[in-house]
Image: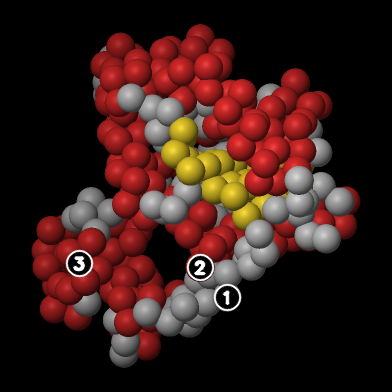
Amino acid sequence: MERTAILIAGPTATGKSALGLDVAEEVDGLIINTDSMQVYRDLPILTARPGAAALARAPHRLYGVLGAQEKCSVGRWLELAAQALKQARVLGKTPIFVGGTGLYFKALEEGLSPLPPVPDEIQARAAALFAEIGGEAFRAALAARDPDAAARLPSGDRQRLIRAWSVGEATGRSLSDWHQIKGKPLLTGPRLGLVLEPDRAWLYERCNARFDAMMAAGALAEVEALAARRLAPDLPALRALGVRPLMRSLAGDLPLEEAVSHAKTLTRRYAKRQMTWFGNQIMSWKRINTQDMESVRGKIFSFIRENILTGR
């Protein structure tokens, strides 16, 4: 009988990894990374990747599997996740997806639209146009071709704006139209979704404290090593929270104290966006207030035992 998959989602710094570990020990699970930054091996500290002690407690997959020079799209992650899910099934373990990337969870349950490949020269032309006219004008031009995508994407989201433009240019059909075509979901069997929903003030304090802990653990040296590689600035790994402010500090353009403050602000804003996304997109999942995790932990495991262990 196929084991019920467990999905644990929520904003950054809510304790998802710790809960996932506890759940894995309870249900003999295999943890599958569902975070777009923890797939990269170059930033273990700054992305709060599970350490050796956590890896020893339960099997983990898709953590640190790509280099910063690579790009991990939702489609590529879904391919890797399919392999990890197959491993969990072969080993007879409960698959536990843990992370904060909403689009990854959405792809698990709904699949991906079958987007066609876009020639490199078209993407290059779009990137050149973006560089020439700037984000605001590029977004306005995109609105004439794909108003839905332009309305959804901010002018600073260079990568996705260029992607939307390139798809329309290559196919004659807007990216929004392509997104209407649903793909095949990866998870088709029984599953249980849990969303961690803390109090916002508590979460912001956690974000600040965790970034301080990252700095104390060597995050600056980690970023310095990454900067020394002089990778293309539009690579996803370089968008990890804190990377750009710390790079500016290392380059002498920003005092370290200001860089840390800016990184904390970016982290809090990102956590807020995550809370909004999970609140709007996956309404059917069970909500858990992590602010008082210890007091609700027993209820969580009772819920899992009732819904998972009795019929796994």
> Which badge, 2 or 1, comes first in the chain's sequence?
2
State the CA–CA distance, disc 3 to disc 2: 23 Å
Which structural element holds mark 2? Answer: helix
Q: Is residue 204 visible to us here? A: no
Residue under the point 19% across and 55% down: 155
Question: At which x and y percent is residue 308?
Answer: 70, 46
Question: At which x and y percent is residue 37?
Answer: 52, 42
Numbered label attached to residue 150: 3
Depth check: give the residue in front, 82 or 310. 310
Q: In this view, does 102 lie above or below 116?
A: above
Which structural element holds mark 3? Answer: helix
Question: At which x and y percent is residue 262?
Answer: 28, 24
Which quadrant does the N terminus fall into?
bottom right
Mark 3: which amino acid? Answer: Ala
Mark 1 Cα shell of 10 Å, populated few (<14), some (14-19), many (≥20): some
Q: Nearer the viewer, mark 1 or mark 3?
A: 1
Which structural element holds mark 1? Answer: loop
Question: At which x and y percent is residue 149?
Answer: 25, 69
Is 62 placed left or right of 155 in the picture? right
| Residue corresponding to mark 1 | 184
Q: Is residue 209 visible to us here? A: yes
Q: Is residue 18 above or below residue 39?
A: above
Mark 1: which amino acid? Answer: Lys
State the CA–CA distance, disc 2 to disc 1: 7 Å
| Residue corresponding to mark 2 | 110
Is 95 placed left or right of 137 in the picture? right
Residue under the point 22% across and 77% down: 146
Give the number of callouts: 3
> Which badge, 3 or 2, comes first in the chain's sequence?
2
Depth check: give the residue in front, 99 or 288. 288
Mark 2: which amino acid? Answer: Glu
